[in-house]
């Protein structure tokens, strides 16, 4: 084979390699991640009042767990779908002496975004920050009467990803959940007899701390 042909083939090979190298890098960045986690949710209280009475409802702190699915939209940015669940109890106290306590199921279904940041000389570590919007579903059984309420909620999150191997990592997370009570809520007023306490626009704040594993594709 002549020297000219060797040089020509080498040049073409190098050009093809240069053409596809950015595409491979982009493909590695444009990936999906799926994972699950366990955690602990704290806080959750709301107060209301009418002309004569005041009331306070408290959600007990309890373990929680959930799952998430992320789709990369560009390098370091993901669209995220998430679900979480907390089995806990709620207590309600009214200034006339009425008290109630019952099992409460709190679920969230959210959609939003997540940003991850690269750390120089530590590719295995990536701090993350995100925000989502969706619904919080409260469900309870009070003396045989079932209640279910859907409320608008926002979640802000910070944490970090630790890449163990190419397709497997650990994700630590701290989340602030804010749920807005849009109208009078029988669930947060004690019993199924109804109530006249105005909770409209009042937020419920909860904090969640958790850790889990994820697979990257």
Image: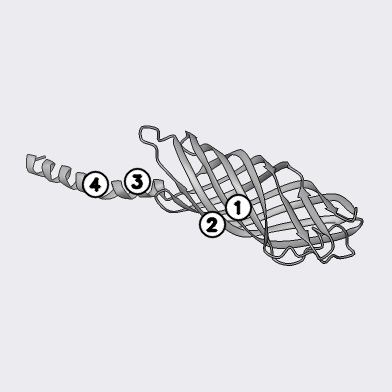
* Mark 1 or mark 4, earlier in chain: 4
Image quadrant where one finds the N terminus: top left
Residue tagged 3: 25
Could you tell me residue 160's position as x and y percent? 50, 39
Residue 60 picture location, percent across and down: 76, 44
Left or right of residue 160: residue 4: left
9 sits to left or right of 117: left
Instruction: Give the mark toward the camera: 1 or 4.
Output: 1
The colour scheme applied to this rendered structure is one colour
Closer to the camera, 105 or 45?
A: 45
- Is disc 1 surrounded by few (<14), some (14 to 19) or many (20+) residues within 10 Å? some
The dot on residue 13 is none
Res 180 → quadrant: bottom right
- Frontmost of labels 2 and 3 is 2
Q: Residue at x 59, y 53 (%)?
A: 155
Numbered disc 4: secondary structure: helix
Q: Are marks 4 and 2 in contact (CB under 8 Å)?
A: no
Q: Please say if the residues under marks 2 and 1 sit with CB atoms less than 8 Å apart.
A: yes
Disc 1 and disc 4: Cα gap in Å?
38 Å
Q: Secondary structure at mark 3?
A: helix
Where is mark 4, residue-wise?
A: 18
User: Which is closer to the viewer, label 3 or label 4?
Assistant: 3
Q: Earlier in the sequence, mark 2 or mark 1?
A: 1
- Which circle's residue, 3 or 4, is located before the other in the chain? 4
Q: Which residue is mark 1?
A: 82
Of residue 139 and residue 31, the one placed in the foreground of this image is 139
In this rendering, the label closer to the viewer, 2 or 1? 2
- Which residue corresponds to mark 2? 112
């Amino acid at each position: 084979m002549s020297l000219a042909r060797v040089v020509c083939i080498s040049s073409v090979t190098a050009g093809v390699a240069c053409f596809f190298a950015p595409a491979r890098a982009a493909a590695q960045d444009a990936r999906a991640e799926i994972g699950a986690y366990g955690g602990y949710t704290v806080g959750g209280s709301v107060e209301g009042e009418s002309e004569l009475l005041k009331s306070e409802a408290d959600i007990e702190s309890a373990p929680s767990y959930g799952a998430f699915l992320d789709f990369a939209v560009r390098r370091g940015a993901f669209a995220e779908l998430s679900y979480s669940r907390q089995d806990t109890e709620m207590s309600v106290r009214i200034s006339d002496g009425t008290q109630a306590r019952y099992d409460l199921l709190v679920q969230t279904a959210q959609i939003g975004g997540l940003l991850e940041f690269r750390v120089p000389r530590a590719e295995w570590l990536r701090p993350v920050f995100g925000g989502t919007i969706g619904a919080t579903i409260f469900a309870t059984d009070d003396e045989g009467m079932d209640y279910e309420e859907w409320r608008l909620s926002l979640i802000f999150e910070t944490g970090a990803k630790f890449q163990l191997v190419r397709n497997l990592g650990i994700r630590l997370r701290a989340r602030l959940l804010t749920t807005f009570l849009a109208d009078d809520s029988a669930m947060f007023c004690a019993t199924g007899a109804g109530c006249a306490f105005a909770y409209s626009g009042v937020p419920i704040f909860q904090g969640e701390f958790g850790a889990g594993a994820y697979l990257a594709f």
